[in-house]
Image: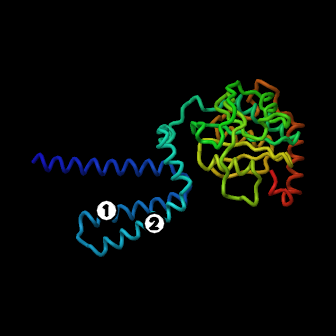
Amino acid sequence: MNFWGFINLKFLLDVLFAIGFGLLLFSRVKEQRTLWLLRGYLFLVSFAWFIQRYAYLPLTSKLIDAVVLACSLSLAILWQGELRRLMELLGTGRLAVLLGNPPKEFRATSTTVNQLVDAAGKLSQNRKGALIVVDLGSDLRPEDFLYSGINIEAQLSTDLLINLFATDTPLHDGAVLVKGNKIISAGVILPLSRQGISRYGTRHLAALGITERFDRCICIVVSEETGTLSLANQGKLERPITSSRLQELLINLVGNQNPLGTMKSSGKKTTSSQIMNTNNNVNIENKSENKNTTQD
């Protein structure tokens, strides 16, 4: 009696763990097409397990195992970026990020948004290239970059961001890492994306590369060639955008529901003339985009 009770308990735990793992996977997948693929794959795995456990069908079992193996190899190729990120998070012990519980100190505020938008707008007007990585909960660490840059650990401000990307400084070619209301490091070298190599420049490929690997970070890009503003999120790039559009996107991404007109910044607000200048830059970009797509 105890033996059968142990067997039933073991079976129950097995089913519960499998259901919990499946729910965790479903909660982490946001794209509908990827969700369909995952559902189909888990259905095949469950069907193969059912056939092997409750039905003695050797030939059917072999065929289903072959299909599951082929699907596993296909998904490994298709999701190589996601699987690499999963292994990196497991290897570095960042289970909170994996389970979807980002630490609160990584969340930006309305002041942070205003300072980022203000700095990006001014850099865009002056056509100074910039790459700003905002960590919203991915817990980015030095080992996540090709080069971790120079430690700054300074209070975030518009003036400091502009100075870090000045062309006569040694850190202007790298990225700046921002967590919450702090600038963590500058001169960071990011991994490049393999998508759109012939279409985007180095800064945009770097923005795509880091946001492909970590879905809780975003990257603001200012093109040095045209002054165009862009925002990378989850391996996708939105460009060109205006300062007002950038502010709207940042508010949505950091979960701040305050109206745009009521947000206050510790520095100067982005004026309407700045937005008009940025719009002019966008118009210039639209006319010359075909000529400059391979540039920074």
Which residue is painted at 38% across and 70% down in the image? 66
Asked if labels 2 and 1 touch by Cβ distance under 8 angstroms, the answer is no
Label 1 to label 2, Cα distance in Å? 15 Å
Name the residue carrying label 1: 49
Amino acid type at image mark 2: Cys
The dot on residue 89 is none
Q: Label 2 belongs to which residue? A: 71
- At label 1, the amino acid type is Trp
Q: Residue furthest left?
A: 1
In the foreground, 169 or 264: 169
Disc 1 or 2, which lies upstream in sequence?
A: 1
Judge from the rendering whether residue 150 lies leftward or rightward of residue 73; answer left or right.
right
Nearer the observer: mark 1 or 2; the answer is 2
**Looking at the image, is 181 positioned above or below residue 228?**
above
Q: Secondary structure at mark 2?
A: helix
| Residue 17 locus on image (x, y percent) | 34, 48
Considering every residue shown, the one lying at the far bottom of the view is: 59
* x then y, percent, for residue 248: 72, 41
Most foreground residue, 289 or 177 = 177
